[in-house]
Image: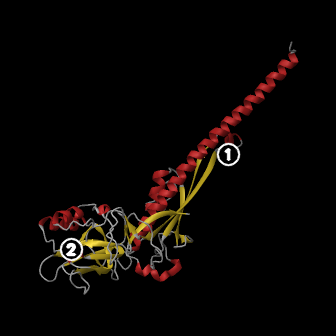
């Protein structure tokens, strides 16, 4: 039989055990809350970094314009308790309420150049060399209420996350291209340019710069390819000269690949209708630029040198001065990054990625 003394000991042990169990339960709750908050803050940092890198592409396309690149469009902090108005600020606020963040420019090596300051110029110029910004880093801090830590005077648990994102020139495009090409020439962004179709000495006889992704050389196929968002995913690789052995399973267009020309002027009603639609909607039409040609007529091919985004404003498909007039833009699409591309040779079509 237990003595009264032994029963008293059991109650004390039980009380201690309950306290320990409650402490473990509180610790588990704190750990779970901190983990959930950590994921939320990391998602906010990732989303904000990607949004910031995309906006950086857009801002840097304004070099030489009035207004030019504006850092406030990237990040423009507001007084405490109010969300900022820049793309980075808004993305953090949308994904982690109450978070505090800092944003920095990154160079092509992923190194910090300094904080994004709305009162200072955006470092876009190629002349800056290693100090040119091609990405952003976002650091996000937030907190979550605590149970166990609150007992010892720590009512919240701090959580922290950081993310880097950069943009790079694409060398592959799997979809979304439009079916015309021009020679890979030096491009002035946001400057009105008239691209004369027959100006180049190496223009393929019988070709006017139209492309066919799968070898269909007719107006209906061209009109389908001009229909947004394009159908370049049906492309197959026609091979390389002189053998031209096609690979019908290769549907991704890479720099260095060949694309088949669609001969003829194609001055048809549906072609003009879709060109008019793109003009009215100011579509950034992503197109391949070529650096070499081979063949002629229905067997003419263009070698892809780079990709560019062209906003068409007018066209002339008649007479001897056939042309397209518009301006080249910076644009973000999906695609793998090219290597060994200098700032001066960038075509203006980029993809954005999270980086270590």
Q: Secondary structure at mark 2?
A: helix
Depth check, front residue: 308 or 158: 308
The residue indicated by pointer 1 is 154
Q: Quadrant of the C terminus?
A: bottom right
Mark 2, Cα crowd under 10 Å, few <14 / some 14-19 / many 20+, is some
Q: Could you tell me if residue 75 is visible in this image?
A: no
Is the residue 330 above or below the residue 199 in the image? above
Residue extending furthest top? 1
| The image quarter in which residue 90 lies | bottom left
Comparing 171 with 49, the one in front is: 171
Q: Position of residue 1 (x, y in %)?
A: 86, 12
Measured in 3D between alpha carbons, the distance from the residue under mark 1 to the one under mark 2, in whole angstroms, is 76 Å
Report the side of 102 relative to 211 (left or right).
right
Return the x and y of residue 264 as percentages of the image width and height: 16, 74
Say which of marks 1 and 2 sits in front. 2
* Mark 2 lies on residue: 298
Q: Is residue 49 above or below residue 192?
A: above
Residue at x-position 45% and y-position 56%? 91
- The spot of residue 286 in percent (x, y) is 31, 69
């Amino acid at each position: 039989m237990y003595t009264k003394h032994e029963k008293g000991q059991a109650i004390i042990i039980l009380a201690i055990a309950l306290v320990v169990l409650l402490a473990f339960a509180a610790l588990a709750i704190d750990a779970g809350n901190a983990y959930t908050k950590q994921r939320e803050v990391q998602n906010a940092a990732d989303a904000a970094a990607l949004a910031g890198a995309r906006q950086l592409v857009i801002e840097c396309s304004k070099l030489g314009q009035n207004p030019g690149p504006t850092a406030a469009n990237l990040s423009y902090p507001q007084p405490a308790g109010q969300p900022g108005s820049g793309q980075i600020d808004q993305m953090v606020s949308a994904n982690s309420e109450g978070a505090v963040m800092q944003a920095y420019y990154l160079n092509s090596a992923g190194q910090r150049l300094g904080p994004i300051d709305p009162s200072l110029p955006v470092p876009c110029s190629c002349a800056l060399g290693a100090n040119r910004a091609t990405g952003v880093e976002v650091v996000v801090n937030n907190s979550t209420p605590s149970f166990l830590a609150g007992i010892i005077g720590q009512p919240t648990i701090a959580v922290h996350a950081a993310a880097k994102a950069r943009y790079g020139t694409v060398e592959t495009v799997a979809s979304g291209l439009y079916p015309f090409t021009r020679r890979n020439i030096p491009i002035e962004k946001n400057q009105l340019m008239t691209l004369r179709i027959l100006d180049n000495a190496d223009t393929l006889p019988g070709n006017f710069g139209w492309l066919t992704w799968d070898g269909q050389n007719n107006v209906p196929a061209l009109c389908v390819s001009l229909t947004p968002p394009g159908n370049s995913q049906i492309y197959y690789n026609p091979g390389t000269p002189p053998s031209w052995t096609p690979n019908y399973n290769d549907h991704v267009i890479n720099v260095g690949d060949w694309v088949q020309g669609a001969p003829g002027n194609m001055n048809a009603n549906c072609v003009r209708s879709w060109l008019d639609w793109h003009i009215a909607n100011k579509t950034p039409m992503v197109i391949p630029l070529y650096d070499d040609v081979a063949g002629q007529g229905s067997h003419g091919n263009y070698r892809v040198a780079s990709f560019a985004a062209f906003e068409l404003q007018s066209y002339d498909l008649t007479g001897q001065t056939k042309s397209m007039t518009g301006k080249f833009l910076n644009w973000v699409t999906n695609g793998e990054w090219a290597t060994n591309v200098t700032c001066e040779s960038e075509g203006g079509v980029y993809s954005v990625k999270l980086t270590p």
